[in-house]
Every structure is written in structure tokens, then in C-alpha cells.
Amino acid sequence: MVAITTKSKNGGNLHVINLYQFTANDGGQQDVVWGLINSCINRHPGEQVILIRDMNGSTPGGRHNYAHPMEKNIVEADDQLTKFCADSKGTMSSPTENTWKRGDKCAKLDHGISWNIHFPSPRAVFNDVAHQRFDHAILSFSLPAEEFSKKPQPARRQLAPTDRIDAVLFQNHLRAWQDAVQDKMLPAAEENDGDMLMVMQRADQEVMKDEVLKL
């Protein structure tokens, strides 16, 4: 299980958890994992969470060409997945395609579950490259671009022909340049906003360049 956290444009947290759940033969371990994830979600009330990937459990009608009745542990794994969604109040989205196949058997074992965010059905594609072929499909999904796309950055002013810097001259006057820029640089701040840090960095770069051109 791997988890990452990022921020949307409005400053809210989005937690994405990539899960490889234990197989149905390890039902006790599955229970432990579902409990850990439920506890994690409860520690971030109201925040956006996406759980995705191999859950080794299926939805009703999601398994094909299994012996009937199916083995008890498989039925229990499917029930545990349904119970987890109900207990945690998560919304499950499954691909339209099967995500696992072995011989004649196939099933939807990979899903996405979301909390406090609309999550479209993920897409499942099997990799046909021989040395990268697995029994599970590759899952992909998209996020709303208006919430997570990068803000446009202003274009940097290109150096004019007269802005060329003589490296030898600069080296010979390095101490004078350092003294000139020292009092003009913006003071260090405990600033966490990425856009503001970029503005401050570019302002300092302009100061340093302008002082070089005055040498």
C-alpha cells in the first residue's frame, strides 16, 4: 500500500492510496487492511480520498467462469469489500472491463473507492508486452482539471542583446556585485505557498541580473 497527498487549487487535501490487498485466501489479513484504511479515512474527516487498485474482491456479478458454488473464502472476500464501502461510506467505481484473468476465469478485482470527491469509472487495459504481462490490468483514472491543473505562469522576459554578461568582468567584480545585491534581495520567509515562492524567486533573479549589468 502506497499513499500520497496533494492539494487542490482551493487548498484542500487529496489523499490517493494505491492498494494491493491480500488474496481471498488471507481473509484475516484483508480485515486488518480494511481496518487500517478505515482508520486513516476517519483521521481526515471531510477531506478528499481516493483508494484504487487491486482489492482482491469483486462486486455482485463481477466474477465469471468460477465453479458454483464459489469457494467460501472468495465469497467472504467479496462481502468484506462491500461491507468496507458501507462502513466507511465510500463510493465504489468499477471499470466496465474485467481487470483480472487466468485461463477461463475472469473478474473485476480492481476498483476505485472515493470519499468527498466525484470519481469517474477507472479504465482497465491489459499490457500485451511479453515481459510486462500480468494477470491484472493497468488501471487509470482522471481528476477534474479545474481542481488540480497548474496555474499558468507568466512568461519570463527574454534577455535582450544588450543583456549579455561578460563572464570575466563579472568574476573580477564578484565582491562588488555581492555587496550590491545583498541589501536588495527579499528577506527569507517561512512561505509555503508555491506561487508566492516563485514570485519571490523571480524578483530576486531580476535584482541579481540588473546588478550584473551595472558592472
Image (spheres, helix red, strand yellow):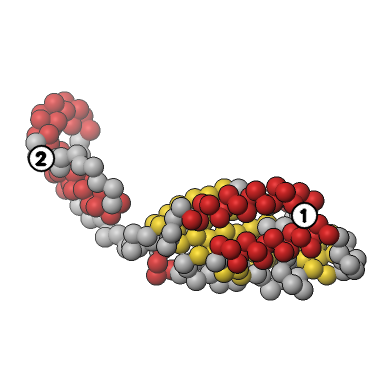
Q: Name which residue lies at 23% across and 55% down.
A: 157
- Discs 1, 2 touching: Cβ within 8 Å: no
**Horizontal side, residue 137 vs residue 168: left or right:** right
Task: Name the residue carrying label 2.
Answer: 184
State the image coordinates of residue 128 (x, y, percent, origin top left).
Answer: 75, 59
**Pointer 2: residues within 10 angstroms few (<14), some, or many (20+)?**
few
Q: Name which residue lies at 9% across and 36% down.
A: 183
State the image coordinates of residue 111 (x, y, percent, origin top left).
Answer: 64, 64
Q: Closer to the N terminus: mark 1 or mark 2?
A: 1
State the image coordinates of residue 135 (x, y, percent, origin top left).
Answer: 78, 56
SS at mark 2 in the image: loop
Q: Name which residue lies at 57% across and 69% down.
A: 91
SS at mark 1 in the image: helix
Q: Quadrant of residue 64?
A: bottom right
Residue type (three-letter) at the residue carrying disc 1: Ala
Query: Which of the numbered marks, if any, corresponds to residue 24?
Result: 1
